[in-house]
Amino acid sequence: MSDMDSFAERAVRRVARRTSRRSLLTLIGGAITGAAVIPVLPVSRAVASTHGGGKSGLPPQTTGNPQDPGDQTQCDYWRYCAIDGFLCSCCGGTASACPPGTEMSPITWIGTCLNPADGRSYIISYNDCCGKSSCGRCLCNRNESDRPMVRPQSNNDINWCLGTESGSVYNCSTAVILGTALESK
Amino acid sequence: MSDMDSFAERAVRRVARRTSRRSLLTLIGGAITGAAVIPVLPVSRAVASTHGGGKSGLPPQTTGNPQDPGDQTQCDYWRYCAIDGFLCSCCGGTASACPPGTEMSPITWIGTCLNPADGRSYIISYNDCCGKSSCGRCLCNRNESDRPMVRPQSNNDINWCLGTESGSVYNCSTAVILGTALESK
Amino acid sequence: MKVRRFLGAAALAIVAGAAQAASYPEPLANEPIPNVVELSAQYPASWVYVHDLHFNSLPDGRAAIVDVAADVRAFKGQVPVAQFGTLLPSTTRPEIYVAETFFSRMTRGERTDVITIWDKATLKPKGEIVLPGGKRGQFVTLRNSFQLTNGEKWALLFNFTPASSVSVIDIDARKILNEIDLPGCSLVYPTGPRGFTSLCADGTMTSIELDTAGKVAASSTSKPINDIDHDPMFMTPAMVGKTAWFATFKGNIHGLDLANAKARDLGVFQMPKEKTAEGEWRPGGWQVISADAAGRLYVLMNPAGKEGSHKDGGSEVWVVDPARKQRVARIPLQNPAVSVEVTAQSAPLLVASRSDGSLDVYDATSGAFQRTLAQVVHDPMTMTASR
Amino acid sequence: MKVRRFLGAAALAIVAGAAQAASYPEPLANEPIPNVVELSAQYPASWVYVHDLHFNSLPDGRAAIVDVAADVRAFKGQVPVAQFGTLLPSTTRPEIYVAETFFSRMTRGERTDVITIWDKATLKPKGEIVLPGGKRGQFVTLRNSFQLTNGEKWALLFNFTPASSVSVIDIDARKILNEIDLPGCSLVYPTGPRGFTSLCADGTMTSIELDTAGKVAASSTSKPINDIDHDPMFMTPAMVGKTAWFATFKGNIHGLDLANAKARDLGVFQMPKEKTAEGEWRPGGWQVISADAAGRLYVLMNPAGKEGSHKDGGSEVWVVDPARKQRVARIPLQNPAVSVEVTAQSAPLLVASRSDGSLDVYDATSGAFQRTLAQVVHDPMTMTASR
């Protein structure tokens, strides 16, 4: 855990030295942009027309809360604006909980997604669920404000299971609300 | 290796005690039947319409020998009448050779397939290639004279990599000519 | 956990300036990290273990646990079942046993066979029993390679090297009690209070009675009962109490009474013989027979039956009453199926697995189609309903 | 081997009575067992390593070796590349290096990171170097996580825990010479005769010169060269000699001269900016840039470019002459592509990988489509042409 602490602290100190508070938030949350639902040719982890961004083929899973609208089994659900991987909602977990028997990674990448119902932008933490092999359902890749490996904390290509006790095998990804962001479009 | 020897010898002795020579050959080679090419709903290892028995999508690989006709990347090639697995022809090997870096299993199941060119039935040994993970190309399952696990030497569901030095991980299956069979239809 | 606090603090700072939408004065609440779902220790009877052979990565097999009565959130979780492994749920304890094989370098290197014990509620491993000798039989999953006996306190594991043997394992003591050589015989069918039967390559069956230490107390071999050349029994029977009902390649139903120490042959009865344009109706698929709690049998049938068609899947399920030796219903399937399983509910569900890994679920009583659970696994060869 | 002789004898006995077809008096010859294909130790320039991330089983990644100039028997063999591993072919020895990770129970248990050394001719492992500490960086494959330096006698491996460091490994001695902490910097770009450059989160780059023992002889950090917020460089450059050409998200080409111990920024030039109905043409995909032996660059382009589109793949390849800083051709692709790679042949081939694992091959000079190699792998993120 000391590695992780120093990673975060170093990243903050390093950047704080030469950036404004606005840029710091950008670094933490990724570029603060609204998250329109864009049909894509999905690549990366989400390799393909057959997978990421396609229809999951599952019946809708909604929260029932009109302020949190959409189907959590679909790649176009608002929280998934920077997700990369199998949706835990399809794997025995939920949009914010890991499937039984997996371990939620303590650190991960974060994005900022616009909630179309309340018009707020939320900081979303894409914690990986770890310790079982690839779930195999609902592969989804969206890259709003994703940045390359050069900036790990904004990169969704990393196997963030590296921080877990149960080893680094990746099962699925969650999209957990950490708070609202400063601005929204 | 002594286990394998005793397996084969025991099987022969056991059966020889109460069967005619004709039945013995049946036991060794499976039921001696002609191998018509039958379109199937493939199951088992060859799970599915998307896989076993479907078109490989590869360009034809022929031997150039008119006595050995057909496309060795297709499930309907005459030698594959009782094969179950990925075709080594599509995986860096040939119909009778393993891909580089794999090990050919010394024992396996055998079938009897009719060569449509010369009208002979051949004893085909379906040696598995072992020591690398599933090839993933040209899955094919045909079950002429296949018998359940109760008769292992006629069963194509077994991972025959059990006899190798490099461990029991399965890569693909060959179809090696061991000789001609007694009868053909 | 400093990292999380750091992120949390940053998020709080941001909240202050957030734009407020008139209709929702409060933003959505922050959510906890970590957060992992747990299951109940006792699974409902509508849950089914769907084994995924995972042909594109055989070392990485697994099983999905699925509520086949649910339209939403049907997928409950996964348990690894590595390298032609076999999954075996306890019916009396909150445990799942998995017999599987690992290599030190995943596809090569040193082999280790183990029985892993999983907790049903947490789906975390509780322990493992290492099995020496690299003997565990590896083949397309058959439930009867790994079974329980002695009030579910012992496991029976079939070994194949290709020499055949059965290991007797004390689950509580986490130790192997015995290994019984069974030349020419295959698989384990629990028999009597403490013992098993195996089916043999010469058509006979051998019953082994075990003593309290796991040693062979008695053994007996039947006369040939299985016509392997002409009409072999599929290896996985439907269990009705202690009676095992096997389908045969040509559409007969063959019963074995396994209630007592020595298996008793109940003989064969025919399902209707019906010719079709492509051949005749025969059982076809991988796990072709299952039973409901009332003792009715469900047999997956292929209309193009002939030599070599026995793994081609099926397009109908025939419902058979073994007491009356009669077919009582036909259920046409929405899609061709690989395997079938029936739940133990009082209103049973029929589950038909498809080659694309989806499950079609039917009301077993009426035959009415209920739902499809899409792409639950990759290669759904074997299913086991919760009991 | 007695078994084989036994089967052979049986087969011979049967031959005697075989029916003879008039047109073929002799039956087909018996074939030898075992029989395993070998490759040449030096691969032709038309061979390409296609890394398969294998998203449906990440622990079971692998690479296919493919002759992209061949219509038949294009698939040469496979090398395992486990768990977000990276493959690195030597250009001077008949060896392939793979940095990868295993677990004692495949998906859990004790972690072991290794570099496995494969023989190009036999595709068998020749040795391995165990890497302590469980540090190897794991992410969707990037070639620049694992590179060679010092005349290919040393390997450089990027670690990420999330603390960043680079291990210097002597391949001959099979040992780790050094581990260099590089806080905030990522990946390795071999630089000068013995050293490397890393790209850093603040937009700078750091060059490390190594001494003959693998220790840091000198290090230097540039001013910011990478506008990560607004127009970041993709992480995988095309190499033309010792010059690395990077594409940026918005379609600029950024050169770094890595010939000497300290990397030198060659600055940026623009590809044509062209608006479309869906946005603008931008690089898109995973490995979006490659070079031919003449130094022309090939960039995979997406017509719907905007923030977040950078991994969406591409439908054209733009050919760019970096000397003239001009686009010299556009190659419309038959199918959307994930990644591109160009062979080092004098008549180069352009390989475009598709999301279904197929490869489309084009004449890189004319842009003419040549062939599709169907479903070579599952998830073809990274390709490396033989050199």
Image (cartoon, coloured by chain):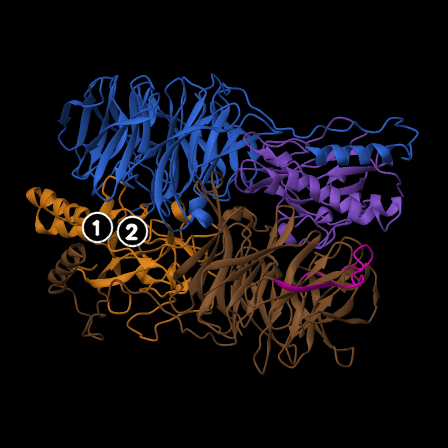
Chain colours: A orange, B purple, C brown, D blue
The answer to which quarter of the image holds residue A112 is: bottom left
Judge left or right: residue A15 versus residue D48. Answer: left
Q: Which residue is mark 1?
A: A31
Q: Which residue is mark 2?
A: A144
Q: Are marks 2 and 1 in contact (CB under 8 Å)?
A: yes
Helix, strand or loop under label 1: loop
Give x and y (percent) for residue B153.
72, 46
Give the magenta part as a residue range.
C216-235
Q: Residue at x 81, y 44 (%)?
A: B35
| In the depicted structure, whether residue B118 falls above or below residue D346 | below
The answer to which quarter of the image holds residue D29 is: top right
| In the depicted structure, whether residue D173 falls above or below residue B165 | above
| Residue that lies at the very extreme toward the left in this rendered image | A17
Give x and y (percent) for residue D308.
31, 48
Of marks 2 and 1, which one's residue comes earlier in the chain? 1
Amino acid identity at mark 2: Glu
The verdict on residue C218 being magenta is yes
Query: For mark 2, does the 10 Å Cα neighbourhood hold few (<14), some (14 to 19), or many (20 or more) residues?
Result: many
Give x and y (percent) for residue B54.
66, 47
- Chain at tag 1: A
